[in-house]
Image (cartoon, rainbow, N blue to C red):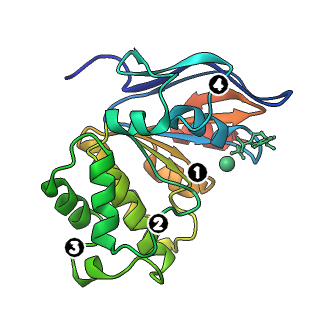
Amino acid sequence: VSSAGPVLAARRLRARYGGFVALDGVDLDVPAGWVTAVVGPNGAGKSTLFHCLAGTLRPVRGRVLLDGRDITRLPAHARTRLGVARSFQELAVFPSLTVAENVRVGAEQGRVGDPGAVERALALFGLAGPVRELPAAGLPTGTLRRVELARAYAGDPRVLLLDEPAAGLDTAEVTALARILRALAADGTALLVVEHDLDLVAGLADVVHVMAAGRIVASGPPDRVLEAAP
Ligand code: ADP
Ligand code: MG
C-alpha cells in the first residue's frame, strides 16, 4: 500500500493540561522511509505531541491521521494494532519475562504477530544470542533499550515513535543505534524521534522540526536547522 501522503500526520493539534496550553496548533508529517526528528528545549511540548500521536493523551482540537484515516479518537492499543508502535523514555519492559518473551509481547500487540517477526526483531537488535533467554530484570540499560526497540519493531509497525532512544546509552551504543534506525527507515518504516542528543539527530534525521512553547518554530534538513536551534 504505497501512498504519496505521510504515514502519520498531525493536523492543527492543540492539547492542554488544565488551563495550560501545551500544544498550540501543531502540524507534522511523518513520511515512510524517513527519520523525522523533533527537538527543542525542556517544556517545549515534545512529549505532549508524542502522547497525542501514540494515543495516550487526547488533544482538545485537531486530528491525528494514519494513512489519511482519522485515528484521533482511537485509544493507544488500537493504534498499536494498526501499526503505530512506540518506545518509552522510561524503559517499559516486563522485568520477569525473558528478552525473547518481551519481544513476543510486542509482536502480539502489533499488526502481524507471527513468530518470524520476533526472530527478525531479535536478530536486528543484536538479541538473538544467549541473552534472549535471560530475564529482562538486571540487564544493562543499553541492552534494555534494544529490547524495548525490538519489542516495538516486532509488531511490524508502519510508524515507530521513539522518545529519547539514546537516553542512558554510551557513544558506541548510540552509533550502533543510529545504524539500526537508518536501516529501519531504508526498509520503509516511518520513524519519529524525539531526542535531546543533537549529535544523534544530526547524524540520523532526514528532517528536523524545532519546537518551542507548544509550536513548531523551524523545520528543515538537520544541517540547516540545528545551527539555528535554541
Ligand atoms: P518536553 O517533552 O518538550 O520537555 P512536555 O510536552 O513534557 O515538554 O511539556 C510541555 C509543557 O506542559 C511543560 O510546560 C510541562 O510543564 C507541561 N506539562 C507536561 N505534562 C504535564 C502534566 N501532566 N500536567 C501539567 N502540565 C504538564
Ligand atoms: Mg519530554
Viewer-closest of 197 and 163: 163
Residue named by callout 3: 128
**Disc 1 marks which amino acid?**
Glu
- Nearest to N terminus: mark 3 or mark 4: 4
Residue type at the position of mark 3: Ala
> Which label sits in the foreground, 3 or 4?
4
> Is disc 1 placed on a helix, strand or loop?
loop
Q: Quadrant of the C terminus?
A: top right
Q: Residue furthest right?
A: 19
Q: Is residue 174 visible?
A: yes
Task: Measure the C-alpha gap from mark 4 to mark 1.
Answer: 22 Å
Left or right of 165 in this view: 41: right
Residue 59, numbered label: 4
Q: Is residue 41 left or right of residue 115?
A: right
Between marks 4 and 1 in the image, the one whose residue lies nearer the viewer? 4
**Closer to viewer: mark 3 or mark 1:** 3
Q: Are marks 3 and 4 in contact (CB under 8 Å)?
A: no
Give the spatial CA distance, label 2 vs label 4: 32 Å
The quarter of the picture where residue 30 lies is: top left
Percent x, y of residue 227 = 65, 43
Identify the residue under disc 2.
Answer: 174
